Amino acid sequence: MKPILNTLYIQTQGSYLRLDHETLKVEVEREMVFQIPLHHLRSIVVFGNVLVSPFLLHRCAEDGRDVVWLSEYGRFHARLNGPTTGNVLLRQAQYAVLNDPGQTLEIARLMVAGKLQNARTVLKRAAREGKGSPDQGSLNEAAEAQADGIRRAEQASDLDVLRGIEGSAARAYFAAFSGMIRLNRDVFGFTERSRRPPRDPVNALLSLAYALLSNECVAACESVGLDPQVGFLHALRPGRPALALDLMEELRAPLADRLVLTLINRNQIKPDDFVDRPGGGIYLTETARKTFLAAYQKRKQEEITHPVLNSKIPYGLIAHIQARLLARYLRGDLPCYQPFLFR
């Protein structure tokens, strides 16, 4: 269990969280092992078999403090939200756009273009850093596939065509992903995405990074007053945070993928940091997961110049900025949605 910034992560299995006056206390086998003033926390993330007292849940809901449940291995299960707030007119505008196929396609097209452009930037940067290596050619080819996808996306006639273009570009990106790995490639070799369960170490890292990023995007939608389940690129399904997944697309490569590559290439995550589980899944050990979470939180503190705002903001606020830009477009304050472009 570790507070990182203002988020408390509980990974110790069998923990029990309760509220004692204004202090959150953590017990393991009926012994208090950790405590922290509740007002220091904006969210609580628990992994696996961790119990939270009803009184603490009620208090978190009242305060608007997030409680997020992940599986023991980092897969998103549920989130506690307080009462629905936000501008009802904004949500009305969001629903109206969903019923306008042309406007929906235009937003989705820009989101896909942002995703492919950012993937292209990550690939091109890796190709430059690996100049002279055998991987440079495949990385440049994958980067060109992203550029081709952007051009084709501009001509997409409907959402199904657009999703097909995005899927084709993603396959080219992941086919070249191994070329960006510099260390221990015999273990961290990568061929394709596998989920539920992840079948190799790189997929285990990507799945954890995407689960964390998805939570950030849901929180960003909620904080602006958007309905996270009403998206434009991803199809609507009960319980699916389609809009959060939409926002997440353009952030995958610069935030999640680059973090995974950095941890591998700097040897912060090593080949023996994984365990095999029944069913063929491969997951991080508890110690390695702590390393990953600490690195993720540290990355969120790093600053980057936002191309639209033209000012430095922490990585951790990008999803919130993009949700706010989308809300301004839906309200008619901006002529179009402007995706985040990584440079």
Image: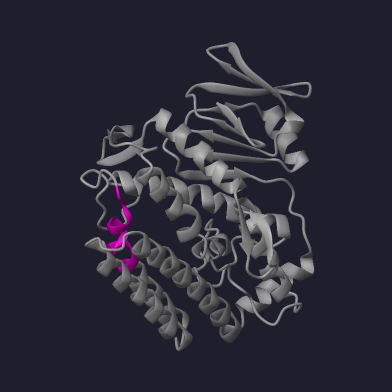
Q: Toward the viewer: 293 or 280? A: 293
The majority secondary structure of the magenta stretch comes to helix
Q: Is residue 196 visible?
A: no
> Which image quadrant is residue 257 in?
bottom left
Residue 109 is situated, as x and y percent measured from the top left of the image, at 51, 79
| Residue sitting nearer the eye, 43 or 313 | 313
Is 215 above or below relative to 62? Answer: below
Q: Residue at x 47, y 32 (%)?
A: 290
Q: Is residue 239 above or below residue 67?
A: below
Q: Residue furthest front?
A: 132
Q: Which residues are magenta?
A: 171-182
Residue in the image at 53% along x and 28% along y: 50
| Residue 302 placement (x, y as % from top left) | 60, 49
Q: Which residue sits at x=47%, y=72%?
A: 117
Nearer the observer, 188 or 215: 188
Report if residue 173 lies within the magenta region.
yes
> In the figure, is residue 311 to the left or right of 261?
right
Question: In this view of the protein, which residue sits in the foreground, 342 or 27?
Answer: 342
- Left or right placement of residue 332 versus residue 272 in this view: right
Q: Quadrant of residue 221?
A: bottom right
- Looking at the figure, which quarter contains the N terminus? top right
- Is 160 within the magenta? no
Residue lying farthest to the top in this orientation:
31
